[in-house]
Image (cartoon, helix red, strand yellow):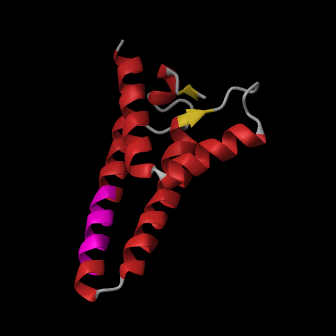
Amino acid sequence: MSIASDDAVQGGGGLMSLGKAFGFYVGAVVALVAGAVIAGISKAVIVYFVVYFACGIFLNRTVLRNLITFHPVYNTLHNVFSTKVRALIFWPISYLVLIGKIAVVRAI
């Protein structure tokens, strides 16, 4: 995996900015909290899981795809699959860590 270059961050490569990625992450967390409230009120726990996985899929399709690129050597089916599945299952933690790491790398 590699992060977007400075040219791509400024809009040259079509990749997403870090601020926009963080905004999508915050929106997904808000949707998850709203799903938890709805699931608690309606006593339908399945609503929470549907919202959880829908937010994970949304973040995989929008943020992960446009925030990082895989190096051609490591762009194997196994590496891409395992990264996307881990990001889907553990998205509240994995995206926060990913955005934090990229912010530190770009700041230094």
Q: Decide if residue 82 is in sight here.
A: yes
For the point 55% across and 38% down, the residue is 14
Q: Quadrant of the C terminus?
A: top left
Which quarter of the figure has residue 68?
Answer: top right
Q: Quadrant of the N terminus?
A: top right
Percent across and percent down for residue 93 are 38, 44
Relative placement, left or right, of 63 versus 19 is: right
Residue 11 on the magenta segment:
no
Up/down of 87 relative to 103, above or below: below
Main SS, magenta residues: helix
Which quarter of the figure has residue 48?
Answer: bottom left
Up/down of 80 relative to 42, above or below: above
For the point 26% across and 65% down, the residue is 33
Relative placement, left or right, of 57 versus 45 is: right
Up/down of 19 relative to 108, above or below: below
Say which of 14 and 31 sits in front: 31
Relative placement, left or right, of 107 versus 65 is: left
Say which of 31 and 52 sits in front: 52
Percent across and percent down for residue 62 are 51, 51
For the point 46% across and 50% down, the residue is 90
Task: Name, please, the residue furthest toward the bottom.
Answer: 42
Magenta stretch: give its range.
29-38
For the point 36% across and 31% down, the residue is 100
Residue 36 on the magenta segment:
yes
Q: Decide if residue 21 is in sight here.
A: no
Up/down of 53 relative to 4, above or below: below
